[in-house]
Amino acid sequence: MKTAALPTPLAAEGRVPATAATQTLLRAWVASCNEFRQRERREIIEQPPSPQRLAEYREELKWMIRAARALLNLVSDPDFPAKQFVTEISGKLLQLEDSWQSLNNPMSDAEADTILQKAFPDEARARGSA
């Protein structure tokens, strides 16, 4: 049995646009990632977290990284019509992986001072010889 091909609407640049549902999913995930990073700053970076909160954060971060990798795989597909999401999802993945690295390999005060001194050689340090 022969089936007729369904016509597909073309975007202005001549490509099939991503479905509205897919774009909604990607935008919702990006918003969720932004909210997660804001909570990370408030609850993990700006104040010492409880051991329970830190464990919850670690678990959530693992799943956020997994989701970012899955979404990057989706938007990187050669047939995916909305390539503008590749850069945004890639950037979010890098941010999440950086959070994971900071969580599992925290920098010592001496390392931080060395980096700050190299970046800002003319500035007085807040810590150190006072």
Image: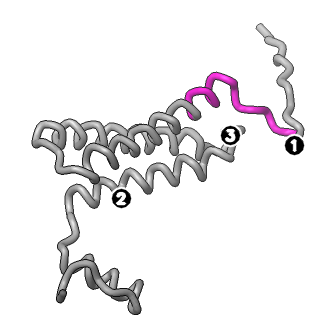
Looking at the picture, how far across and down is residue 32, in whole percent?
Answer: 46, 34
Looking at the picture, how far across and down is residue 97, in whole percent?
Answer: 36, 54
How many numbered discs, if any? Answer: 3
Magenta stretch encompasses residue 38: no
Relative to 105, 73 lies left or right: right
* Amino acid type, residue under disc 1 in the picture: Glu
In the foreground, 125 or 117: 125
Q: Which residue is drawn at the image coordinates 55% and 38% (left, top)?
A: 74
Residue lying at the far top in this picture: please name it.
Answer: 1
**Image vertical order of residue 107 relative to residue 77, above or below:** below
Task: Return the residue at label 3.
Answer: 79
Task: Return the residue at label 1.
Answer: 13
Looking at the picture, how far across and down is residue 24, in whole percent?
Answer: 61, 27
> What segment carries the magenta color?
13-26
The residues bearing labels 1 and 2 have C-alpha atoms spaced at a distance of 35 Å
**Res 51 quadrant in image:** top left
* Amino acid type, residue under disc 2 in the picture: Asp
Magenta stretch encompasses residue 15: yes
* Amino acid type, residue under disc 3 in the picture: Asp
Label 1: few (<14), some or many (≥20) within 10 Å? few
In the foreground, 127 or 56: 127
Relative to 19, 41 lies left or right: left
The residues bearing labels 2 and 3 have C-alpha atoms spaced at a distance of 29 Å
Dot placed on the residue nearer the N-terminal end, 3 or 1: 1
Residue lying at the far front in this picture: please name it.
Answer: 130
Dot placed on the residue nearer the N-terminal end, 2 or 3: 3
Relative to 87, 4 lies left or right: right
Relative to 107, 84 lies left or right: right
On residue 98, which mark appears?
Answer: 2
Looking at the image, do the residues carrying marks 2 and 3 touch, with CB atoms under 8 Å apart? no
**Image vertical order of residue 74 relative to residue 116, above or below:** above
